[in-house]
Every structure is written in C-alpha cells, then in structure tokens.
Amino acid sequence: MSNVSRRSFLKSSGLVTAAAAIPAFATPRVHAGEDNTIKIAWVGCGGRGNGAIRQALNADQNVKLYAVADAFEQRAINAVKGVTDTHEDKVDVGDRIFHDLDGFKQAVDCLDDGDVVVLTTPQGFRPVTFDYVANHKKHINVFMEKPLGVDIPGLKRLIAANEVAKKKGIQVGVGLNNRHYLRTEETVNAIRDGKLGDVLTTWVYRLQGPHILNLREGYSDLQNEISNIFCFDWTSGGFIVDALIHNIDICCWCMDDVPVAAFGSGGRICDPHDKGQRRMQDQLIDCGAIEYVFKDGRRMNLHTRTVPNCWGMFQANVQGTKGCAQLGEGVGDPAIYEGCDMRNAAARKAIWKPESPSNDSYQTEHDLLFKAIRENKPWNEVQYAVDATRTAILGRTAMETGDYITMEDMMNSKRELVPNIDDLRLDSPSPAKRDENGNYEIGQPGITKLV
C-alpha cells in the first residue's frame, strides 16, 4: 500500500495518533517455551479450521495441539478425535476442550509466552477473538483466517488490537493464502514490473452455485446461523466479503492501491433453495455487480452470481496495454495472454508465464509464520488483509444501498452486524433481524442506507 493511501486510511479510521506513537515491533519478541515446544490453541472447529490446524501442525516439527474451543461442545470433541487420527503424536489436549461463544478465552489462557492460537471461528468473531489475544498478558502469536471482520466498527477494533500486537512483537499470519501461491506472487511481480504494460483495469469474478442452507431441528436461530455461516451476513460478512476477498486482494495488489469509492447493484433475483418459491430463510444474494474507483481514475469491476446450472468462472483478470493476465484464486496456472477468451483455452496465446513451481499455499502461509516465530523475526500480515476486508465491505455496502459510497464515508460507518458480540452466548437471541413474516432482512437498493 502506498504511503499516501496508508496515511489517508489512518486518518479516516481515526487511528493516526496511535499508529504514529507505536513503532512496529518496538519491543523484543518472545521465543517458544523453554522445552522448545510451541503449544497451539485451536478456536473454531469448522471446515476451514480443520484444514488450518493440520497445516499448523505440519509447519513445525516440535508443536502440539494443546487446547481447543468451539461454539458446540460435541463438534470440538469430534474435531480433536479427527486430528488425533492424523497427528496422534502432536495432540496433547486432555480435558482442555472448551465450548460456547466465550470458550476461546479459556483455550487462549492455557497457552504460554511464544505459543500460537489458530483463530478460525465465523468471521463475525474475528475482531473480538484477536482483541483478546493481542491484549493478553502473555505473548501469544496468531494465525487467523480472512476476512478480518464483517463491519467497520469490528474492523476498527481489530486494527487497534493489531497496533498492540505490533508493539508487543506478536507474529500474525492471515489466511489470504493466495499471497503465498508462488505462481501468483511471481505473476503479480511481473505485472508490477511492466510485463503487462500499463495496468488499465481489473476484474474480480466468482460465478458458481449457491451455498445450501442446512437447518437443524432443535437448534435456535443463532445456533443454525453459526452452523451455516456462509448463509448469513453477521457470521461471514456476506458473499462479497467472504467469497470474493481473495481476488479483491489480488487485484488491489496488482494496482498497488485500494479504491476510494464504489457503486453497484445486486441482491436476490431468484431463490435456488426452494425451486422458485420465494422463501427467505437466509441472507444469501444470488447476483452482484460492483465497480470500484481508484484515485487515479482506474476501475476494478466485480461480478458474482450464485445460481445453479449456469456457466461458472472463478478468477481475477488484469487488463493492461500489452494483454490480459488471468490469475488469483481459482487459477492454478496464471499467465499473461495476448487475448482473453475465457472459455476457449486453445484460443489464448500466452506471452508470459511464471517459472515458479506449484505449491500448497495453505501450507506455505503456516510454514512462513512458524519460521518467523522460530527465527524471532517480524511477521505481521494484517495491513493488506485489513485493506482487502474494508474494500469488500465497501463493495457490499454500495451493492446493498445502490448509492455511490466513498471509502472515507464507509470508514465512518457505525453499522454493527453484531452489536452485542462480547455478550453473545450460544443461548442468546440471534443478532440477525427477521420481518413480521419470519424472513431475514437483506439489503434493498434505494431503501437501505449507509449508517
């Protein structure tokens, strides 16, 4: 991120004083415990969490899973059993299995200086969990999944917590794993070095089928929402924030900047969950088109559709004066082409391809974090993840309102999707609102306003 845009962001977020006062990594970092074993607490035992914990255990020879927390007790117990099946020699959990929405505190409290917590809860809990870890009396390092929040107040809370983390020298990795896919990284560097000529515009695509809502009998609204996190805004940030953030990040990386404004449209055209019968039991959108504006006038366009039985595409495109690059999440073999036929690979003529080997970027991001911890080197990936998260929230808000929204106005938003996050428990009422017919509220362009 350029110094100018970074200063503008800090001013708009009200954090310029704190940022200026706290130099990054101002205090000595802490090595792992005396026996050289890094203990890991795992918070959030869903699908991505099950992958992340295994990657963390594979990242270092001398680590062990020491404590686990999840909203649901049985899911935490089952998760430990599953990890034990694959990493028996690295599991030492005992009775340190905690549940409910505040169980993460007990899991984190089990750790010592230099240990690691893996935060893979629903995204709505990312600010509160990271805040607790950063301000903990112990020096605890962090891996946390993207996005870093679902609304601006939560994101600002996380930003403030990261200033504390930097002051303490806490190493922090973030799950924008495409940053560590070697072929993507080489392609972005090639674009920034001029292989594509001048970058004119970028495109973010994700055209796929919908997430399927799986309601469980006997569960409360809140429990069902946590069990179906991708179907609700307060848990995931919505489809734009959760599912398109990787390629939003890649395009901003290629542009070397973040947008200053956005406008768009989208929402729910048809309901694929009920064979055409309108039924709003979730907050899923099924289409979205957003145009982001950069301060130099260039654009980033986003197009998403989540309707079954349609043509699919999942990638980022960068258009330059010398051709078009296809890269990002969904593209295993990025390249720069003369043309850009999206359906006929044989019609594309590559003018540049990366030489880097393919790698498991999910594993690499953990390898790099644990290497930094072992070598006592600075490692903090929060800034570009904050930029990607706020850009995604900006687009979602522009789509929901139908307004032209500036990033400055967006960063002043007071809208909280989970206003009672610190007090929320598994038996609490849901923060998601329903209307008199029991339907969940979704954004309505022309009616919904920026708050």
Image (cartoon, grey):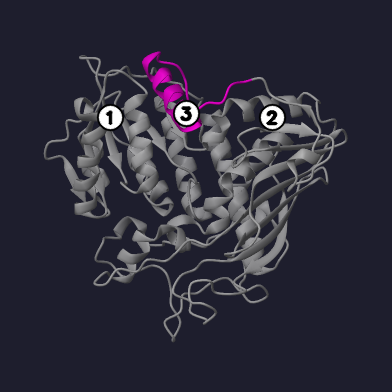
Residue 309 point in image, percent of width and height: 60, 64
Is the C-beta separation of discs 2 and 3 under 8 Å? no
Say if the magenta span includes residue 367. yes
In the image, residue 328 lies at what x, y percent? 63, 38
Q: Which residue is mark 1?
A: 138
Q: Residue furthest bottom?
A: 436
Amino acid under disc 3: Glu
Q: Secondary structure at mark 2?
A: helix
Q: Which mark is residue 79?
A: none
In the displayed structure image, the side of residue 333 where residue 59 appears, left or right = left
From the image, which quarter does the N terminus lie in? Answer: top right
**Residue 72: quarter of image:** bottom left
Does the stretch in magenta take in 313? Answer: no
Find residue 420 and report its horizontal and vertical position in percent. 36, 62
Q: Which residue is mark 2?
A: 188
Q: Residue at x 34, y 69 (%)?
A: 215
Q: Is residue 387 above or below residue 111?
A: below
Label 3 CA crowd tier, 10 Å (few <14, some 14–19, many 20+): many
**N-terminal-most mark, 2 or 1:** 1
Which badge, 3 or 1, is on the more N-terminal residue? Answer: 1
Q: Nearer the viewer, residue 354 or 11?
A: 354
Q: Residue at x 59, y 75 (%)?
A: 270
Which segment did they paint magenta? 356-379
- Amino acid type, callout 2: Val
Q: Nearer the viewer, residue 412 or 272?
A: 272
> Which residue occupies 62% across, 27% down?
183
Q: Residue furthest right?
A: 321
Residue occupied by mark 3: 365
